[in-house]
């Protein structure tokens, strides 16, 4: 029984599958027929429209049918035209944007390169101007063996009160050498290494310069007075013999009496005469010619001022033994001499000589008297 039922079920299942397949095929045929009919209708409508356009079109103007068709399809045409134009503009603008972006980047790079070149040209022009001034100064200081140096470091702050240059002992720079610019005196080298040197400027509070008022020839000592709070680089000059004779505008130069700076180096000019008296006496205020906010190149004067330490040592002569003068001997009446004796207090004394009685001359006798003598006695 079981074996007989299984074939039945198999035959029943095959029948169901066949009927579903047949239905699907019928549906596809009907759909295909409907599409063919619609397509045929559209073609006929298009042909009818074309024929109507050709037949009903008048020679003088637009037909009524054309007006109706144009009126109906114009919004649709405008919509499609706008959509097509938008799509076209989108892709066109996209291509143009990429192109403009590349051009912008190229122009930006070119602009940066030109800006860098312009900045370099301006820096070169400024450096050439500074070097020209230094070159003129180098000719003026030729007798002092100048050497060019660049500032490579300085202490923090707005003032160049101390800084470092790129010249050292290998270039002939040693301690005590003067440092100048084309404007005037800067300071002196207080430390020298192999390839560098440190400079102490005249505006530093530790600096002191023997100066000379060029007009009056008065000597004084100038000291730096600049601090971080100072608005201007000023120096005070003390010990001037006649402050009232000095006026603003007088030029201050080195006097050369401090065995540090050569004589005649220009420093600055007097801007004010103080009416007050400090512990060092009256003073005048000097404004240096050098711009101590901007020091980039300098000249080191390699001729060192001779000092007492650098002069040859002369041997001190041995003094002759001190000789105390001795008084001469005293001559006595009898012709003999007496030597003086030295006393304890450093004086001299002669020995005491007892006076001798003069010889007694006997009285003459009457016989020995002359007649004139006798008459005078009587």
Image (cartoon, rainbow, N blue to C red):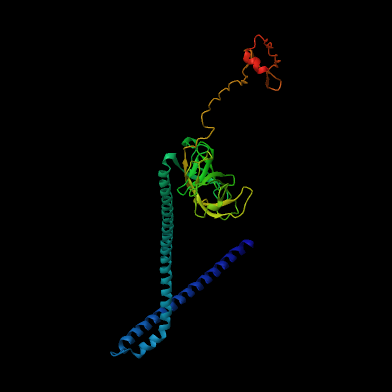
Residue found 56% across the figure and 54% down from its top: 273
Q: Nearer the viewer, residue 351 or 207?
A: 351
x then y, percent, for residue 338? 65, 14
3 sits left or right of 82 in the view: right
Examine the rendering and report whether any part of residue 245 can be seen: yes
In this image, 106 relative to 57: left or right? right
Figure quadrant of residue 122: bottom left
Residue 294 visible in the current orientation:
no
Q: With respect to residue 143, does 339 lie above or below?
A: above
Nearer to me, 240 or 20: 240
Q: Residue at x 64, y 15 (%)?
A: 373
Q: Quadrant of the N terminus?
A: bottom right
Q: Residue at left 40%, top 68%?
A: 92
Q: Quadrant of residue 39?
A: bottom left
**Residue 280 pos. (x, y %):** 62, 47
Q: In this rendering, would 223 be left or right of 112?
A: right
Q: How many marks?
A: 0
Front residue of 56 and 244: 244
Q: Quadrant of the C terminus?
A: top right
Residue farthest left in this picture? 59
Height in image: 201 above or below 51? above
Rendering coords of residue 228 (x, y %): 60, 52
Asked where in the image residue 80 lies, by quadrant, the reply is: bottom left
Which residue is nearer to you in this view: 24 or 89?
Answer: 89
81 relative to 173 in the view: left or right: left
Image coordinates of residue 247 in percent, x first then y, are 52, 54
The residue sitting at the top extreme is 367
In this view, 75 is above or below 281: below
């Amino acid at each position: 029984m079981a074996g007989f039922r299984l074939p039945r079920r198999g035959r029943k299942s095959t029948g169901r599958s066949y009927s579903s397949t047949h239905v699907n095929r019928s549906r596809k045929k009907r759909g295909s027929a409907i599409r063919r009919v619609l397509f045929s209708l559209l073609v006929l409508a298009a042909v009818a429209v074309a024929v109507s356009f050709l037949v009903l079109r008048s020679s003088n103007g637009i037909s009524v049918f054309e007006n109706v068709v144009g009126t109906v399809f114009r919004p649709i045409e405008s919509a499609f035209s706008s959509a097509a134009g938008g799509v076209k503009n989108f892709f066109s603008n996209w291509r143009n944007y990429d192109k403009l972006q590349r051009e912008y980047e190229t122009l930006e790079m070119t602009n940066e390169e030109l800006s860098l070149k312009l900045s370099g040209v301006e820096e070169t022009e400024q450096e050439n101007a500074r070097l020209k001034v230094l070159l003129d100064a180098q000719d003026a200081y030729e007798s002092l063996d100048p050497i060019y140096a660049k500032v490579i470091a300085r202490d923090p702050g707005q003032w160049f009160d101390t800084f470092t240059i790129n010249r050292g002992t290998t270039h002939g720079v040693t301690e005590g050498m003067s440092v100048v610019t084309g404007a005037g005196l800067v300071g002196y080298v207080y430390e020298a290494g192999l390839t560098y040197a440190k400079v102490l400027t005249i505006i530093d509070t530790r600096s002191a310069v023997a100066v000379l008022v060029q007009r009056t020839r008065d000597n004084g000592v100038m000291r730096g007075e600049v601090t971080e709070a100072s608005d201007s680089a000023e120096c005070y000059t003390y010990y001037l013999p006649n402050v009232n004779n000095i006026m603003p505008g007088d030029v201050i130069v080195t006097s050369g009496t401090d065995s540090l700076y050569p004589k005649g180096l220009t420093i600055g000019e007097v801007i004010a005469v103080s009416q007050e008296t400090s512990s060092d006496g009256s003073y005048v205020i000097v404004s240096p010619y050098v711009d101590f906010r901007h020091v980039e190149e300098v000249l080191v004067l390699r001729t060192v001022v001779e000092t007492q330490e650098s002069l040859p040592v002369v041997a001190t002569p041995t003094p002759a033994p001190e000789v105390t003068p001795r008084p001469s001997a005293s001559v006595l009446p009898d012709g003999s001499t007496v030597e003086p004796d030295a006393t304890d207090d450093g004086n001299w004394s002669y020995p005491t000589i007892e006076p001798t009685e003069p010889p007694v001359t006997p009285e003459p006798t009457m016989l020995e008297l002359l007649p004139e003598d006798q008459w005078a006695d009587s």
